[in-house]
Amino acid sequence: MSDTCRWYPLCPMKRFFEEGRLDEKWIKEYCKGNYRECVRYRMEDEGKPHPDNMLPDGSIDKKNVLF
Ligand code: SF4
């Protein structure tokens, strides 16, 4: 059964992955897996701002800068 995060279509992680800038492990582990553990997901739910290059575990991906 598909269990994809409801934010996936809009999430910058999807864009980074499709552009080849993000390892698929993040998508598998979080966006199409245990998304309830994603820090981005929780912050979206709480309406808290967070940078586009913050990874699902809450760390900052220095490769993907904001622009
Ligand atoms: S990074 Fe988090 S909020 Fe974004 S689609 Fe994946 S699980 Fe959802």
Image: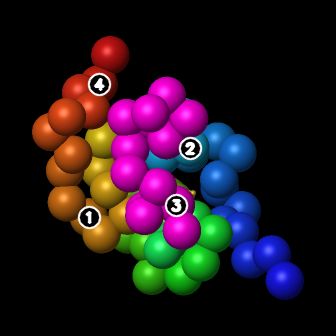
For the image, the number of numbered tags is: 4
Residue to which mark 1 is pinned: 58
Q: Do the residues labelled 1 and 3 touch (CB within 8 Å)?
A: no
Residue 18, image x, y percentages: 56, 35
Q: Position of residue 40 (x, y in %)?
A: 42, 61
- Residue 62: percent from left, percent from top: 15, 39
Tell me if 45 is positioned left or right of 55 in this view: right
- From the image, state whether disc 1 or disc 2 is nearer to you: 2
Q: Residue at x 43, y 62 (%)?
A: 26
Span shown in magenta: 16-28
Mark 4 is surrounded, within 10 Å at the Cα level, by few (under 14), some (14 to 19) or many (20 or more) other residues, namely few
Residues at badges 4 and 3 in contact (C-beta under 8 Å)?
no
Say whether mark 2 is within 8 Å of ligand 1: yes
Determine the main secondary structure of the stretch shown in magenta.
Answer: helix
Whether the magenta-drawn stretch holds residue 22 is answered as: yes
Mark 1 falls on what kind of element?
Answer: loop
- Of the image marks 4 and 3, the number of the one nearer the N terminus: 3
Q: Quadrant of the C terminus?
A: top left
Mark 4 residue type = Leu
Mark 3 CB lies closer than 8 A to ligand 1:
yes
Measured Cα–Cα span from mark 4 to mark 3? 20 Å
Residues at marks 1 and 3, CA–CA distance in whole angstroms: 14 Å
28 horizontally vs 8: left or right: left
Circle 3: element type: helix
Q: Which mark is residue 14?
A: 2
- Left or right: residue 56 compared with residue 7: left
Q: Is residue 37 visible?
A: yes
**Image quarter in which the N terminus is found:** bottom right
